[in-house]
Amino acid sequence: MSRRALRRLRGEQRGQEGPGLGELGLDPGPERAREGGPPPAPGKGPRGPSRAGVSNRFELIPAEEESEDEPAAGEERPDTRLSEQDTAGGSQEGSKDRSKEGAVPEETDGDGHREGQEAEQQDRALATSNKPRKKKKKRKTKKNSAGETVEDNELEDIDSLLERIEDPRLAPQSQGGVTTDSRPLLYVEHRNLNPENELKRYFGARAVLGDQRPRQRQRQYVRSMWLTAPKNTWPRYSKTGITMQLLDTRRGVQHFTFEHHRDYQQVQFKFLDAVESMDPNNIVLLLQMNPYHVDSLLQLSDVCRMQEDQEMARDLIERALYSLECAFHPVFSLTSGTCRLDYRRPENRAFFLALFKHLMFLEKRGCPRTALEFCKLILSLDPENDPLCVLLLIDFLSLRAREYTFLTRLFQEWESHRNLSQLPNFAFSVPLAYFFLSQQEERPELERSQARERAARLIQLALIMFPSVLMPLLDHCSVQPDARVASHPFFGLNAQISQSPALNQLTSLYVGRTHALWKDPAVMAWLEPHVHEVLRMVEAQDALVQEAEHKRKIRYQSAPRNIYRHIILSEMKEATAALPLEVTSQPVMGFDPLPPLDSIVSYTRPERTSHPSNESTLSLFFRSLLPNFNLQGDIRHDGDDEAGAAQDLNQGVNRLMAAMRDMLANIQFQEPPRDDNPEGDGDWD
């Protein structure tokens, strides 16, 4: 506070009499007593009448002049604190002026004492308020889309945390240099089941979503699903008659099954009739009445795919998955890896097939990471039996998605009890994954060298065990081998002819599916010295070469049924051509290819009653024209009820007439060319 303001406070400006702190609402308290000033009069304190001539007691403290006399921030003024002499002198002058007006008796009540303490505190506050204050720096804040403020420090912490999570160098590693993961091997992440998330990482959200965001606000409410995203073009969903039941729980593994209610069974019987008619239009009519019948959706999807309508085929598969997911049991989990479904039950097969066909569409669409997640989901439903044999596919998807660590971990954990090295796809894909790991510069040098050594050892074992893979692989990659490799009998045509048909199917499937991954020049440069090293071991008659030849003769005599089922679903030309005659000669339906021989049937289709000996010649003629026509199919054999028999006969005649009308309506006559065309093309010269 400036000295001029303090004088105004004490009433010393221009000969004005000091009004006293009591009249200003401030009680000097004990300081006034020490300085010798008289105590205030009773009742004349802050609540008493103010000094005459002063209308507003706060006018004595002008804020403008005080602000002018305040020093700048950081400067120290000599008069910020009053010395004891100035304070004593000022108090004596004030006491003399007050003595002229008359003595004021001392206030002895408790209120005066409390008011004196409050005045002392206000004096201290006025003295300390003139000290220079340090300005605090304000943290910059940002507003997110929800309108909430987020501090920069918090954003930096979140970004650093995400970088630590995504950094492969910070992942826990074992002593062997292979990254370890505490989660189960077949753990499925929900975010990886959505192909849009993968496409956003490749092309950005704006390119993927486009103008879909405003449309979603106007979209009607649909149930949120994990496997598929419901579309507005789909029919309204209602309960189809499919439910899922929990059978039992053994050793922490839960076994579920789908069940068909009576109404759904009737629709299933109609679907089987439509399939036997060999007319896709009958399936379309059935779907119009039952838009979420799963087997009809699967079968019609195959028809659309054969007609090159890939978009409609994929849409039908997604609708089938949506129908099945709506029937999930509340305890059924897609991510835990501990839920099982038995493929031997016909009700469960549709879920396996829909997942497999969906992942094939995802792989063709360019979403290998999402397809790998669906492949893990299929394998987790029945890892012991693997009814669709997705082990022949999971290595290819892992390499395409660059999930090399997952592939090496799967090989290490399952090699002891599944003998994955005896499958050509794992024998060649695992060393290729180790080679790609050794090329990643962000990994430690020790880990890279260990991966390089493992890749060299495993690729040599693969070439020794499956020599018939090399030449077709080089042929698909358009690589001409050198003269030594091309002329050597170990890798020549004899290796392909001498192998069993079952092994030929496996090698053809692998080469036809993964040859594009071997076209990299760096991969071919890495493969070449190991091929020559294997030839050196063959010429030296190494024991490993003899042992591998013995294993090939004993094993691979015949392929199991799930491998045939996988080849049929994969539609690889190289492998399909190598299927045996007993598989290709029987009809294969898209909704249930090669059903298991030990199926667990819960309900059966009723047999049709036919009496061909009683059919007339006219009935047989119409049956030859219309395979679905049956004149006596529904006639009841009640000998005593003649009225009922006559009624059935009338129904049969009506059915015959309806069939004839249908046949005549489908007959189209070609109109002869008209000669009276006024705008003809003219005569030919």
Image: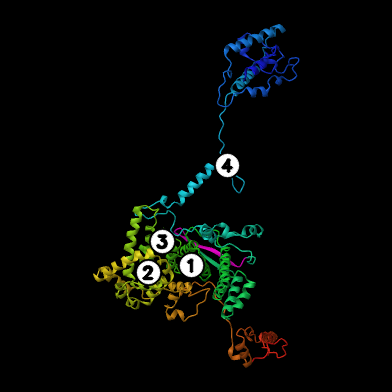
Disc 1, SS: loop
Please tell me in which quadrant of the rendered image residue 661 appears. Answer: bottom right
Say whether marks 3 and 2 touch (CB < 8 Å). no
The crowding category of the residue bearing disc 1, from other C-alpha atoms within 10 Å (few below 14, some 14 to 19, many at least 20), is many
Query: Contact (CB < 8 A) between labels 2 and 1?
Result: no
Q: Earlier in the sequence, mark 3 or mark 2?
A: 3
Residue 38 seen anywhere in this rendered image of the structure: no
Q: How is the image coloured?
A: rainbow
Residue type, label 3 = Leu
Q: In the shown orientation, is residue 434 left or right of residue 28? A: left
Q: What residue sits 52% from the left and 42% below the top?
A: 153
- Which residue is at the front of the view, 510 or 226? 510
Q: CA distance from mark 2 to mark 4?
A: 58 Å
Sequence-earlier tag: 4 or 1 = 4
What separation in Å lies between label 1 and label 3 (alpha carbons)?
Answer: 26 Å
| Mark 4, residue position | 141
Determine crowd level at label 2: few under 14, some 14-19, many 20+ residues with C-alpha closer than 10 A. many
The numbered dot on residue 407 is 3
Q: Quadrant of the C terminus?
A: bottom right
Residue carrying label 1: 342
Which callout, 2 or 4, points to the residue nearer the camera? 4
Q: Alpha carbon of mark 4 to alpha carbon of mark 3: how far?
A: 44 Å
The residue identified by callout 2 is: 424
Question: Viewer-nearest of labels 1 and 3?
Answer: 3
Viewer-nearest of labels 4 and 3? 4
Residue 278 shown left or right of residue 336 in the figure: right
